[in-house]
Amino acid sequence: MAYIIDPNRPHEFGTKFLNAFIANFTDETISETRLDRARIYRELYNIDLLVEIPPENGGKALVIAVEVKIDAGESKEQLGKYQRRVKAAWPHSEAFFGFLTVDGREGTTSADKTWQPISWTGLIDALDRALKSDGRSAIGYPMYSAYVKMMRRHGMADRASDTPLDDAVFTLWKEHKEALEYLFENRPDPIGDLLREIAKSEGEMAELLSSSLGVPVKPAASTSMYRRFFFPDLESRYKVLTKGREAWAGKTASIILLEIYRDGDGISASIVIGPADGAPEFRKRLIEAMNRSDGGNRRAGASGWAHNWKTTLVEAALKEAKDREANTMLRFANQIAESLSDVMHRKLPALLDQAIS
């Protein structure tokens, strides 16, 4: 990743990827001459990725620190320690912090909320969009394409359509169907089983959520990592909410969704603010208002998404079969309602009114 976003490397992408990367943290427009002078560091102060954009015309330097986690969680106070190191090294800079994970989760402590959660899927989607015009002819494109395919193959990002790989999978399934079915059926993944249970009955889950929350809820775009739901009444009342991105939310293109997702070794639910290509300033004001409401400190970048009012549904300790009863979805719906009823009926409409005015 450090090589790909570095505009001074001989990949011919120029500043395309760096611009797309920075958009996860700030809406600020940065000049090409300034981006060309960017410095990209790996493992400086033990931080996985650091981007330094020098100041221009007497302004401040821009520094972005990103910690990457794949299988492991962060150690105690790790992100806070890294943040202090950055601020000590660049005391007069504008600093942003990103927490890059497979599922876009937040850090585990309250201090970690200054670190913008980013998923590999969201980041790769942003990089892909940056290439749509003329980037695919760059000398570095084969390397980038191989890198993205590797990430998707290992489950670190949602996989795009890949015809040769799809053909290979089809052949394997055709010739070894029984063996593959046995492997999949016996793979120990209780958390995945719970998410699949919701996926199989997402219409029923939406009805349970509607009943528990007291507002209409409908299924939206989902993957194996999360199930998303939208709120038709909110969209009817606030038309601006439909100016999101279909690739993120599905046909509803809603900016606000309820997401039930794999959270490390458990399952959580949050109100999520997604991309808003048609209303970026509204989205920025809404995230700022929500941060003030629930004590968060999430950055209102142009892409990615922000989780608010997180509810833990299943913790790592609750993996035994006895905890997976037939009424799991009802239990989840009741837990979500207990946590979010006041948000849906009072707080969120008030925040939307603030963001619109």
Image (tube, grey):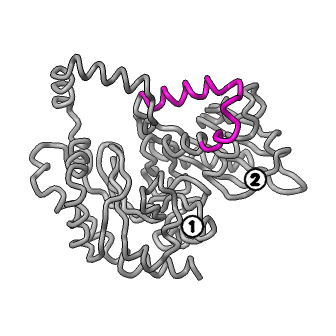
* The C terminus: image quadrant: bottom right
Instruction: Give the vertical position of 357 relative to 119 (above or below).
Output: below
Say which label, 1 or 2, has the lower sequence index.
2
Q: Main secondary structure of the magenta part?
A: helix
In this rendering, position of residue 233 left or right of residue 130: left
Q: Based on the displayed image, in which of its 4 quarters is residue 302 positioned? A: bottom right
Quick check: marks 1 and 2 in contact, CB under 8 Å?
Answer: no
Q: Position of residue 17 (x, y in %)?
A: 67, 40
Determine whether the residue tagged by mark 1 lies in a helix, strand or loop: helix
* The N terminus: image quadrant: top right
What residue is shown at x 57% (from left), y 79% (from top)? 356
In this rendering, position of residue 190 left or right of residue 350: left
Of residues 26 and 152, the one drawn nearer to the viewer in this rendering:
152
Residue found at the far right of this picture: 57
Determine whether the residue tagged by mark 2 lies in a helix, strand or loop: loop
Type of amino acid under label 2: Ser
Of residues 136 and 140, the one drawn nearer to the viewer in this rendering:
136
Sort mark 1 into few (<14), some (14-19) or many (20+) by Cα contacts within 10 Å.
many
Instruction: Give the vertical position of 115 relative to 350 (above or below).
Output: above
**Magenta segment includes 131:** yes
Name the mark nearer the viewer: 1 or 2: 1
Instruction: Give the vertical position of 286 relative to 262 (above or below).
Output: below
Count of residue discs: 2
Type of amino acid under label 1: Arg
Of residues 47 and 9, the one drawn nearer to the viewer in this rendering:
9
Q: Position of residue 177 (x, y in %)?
A: 19, 22
The Cα atoms of the two marked residues, 1 and 2, are separated by 25 Å
Of residues 279 and 57, the one drawn nearer to the viewer in this rendering:
279
* Residue annotated with mark 2: 93
In this rendering, position of residue 7 left or right of residue 47: right
* Residue annotated with mark 1: 283
Q: Which residues are magenta?
A: 129-153
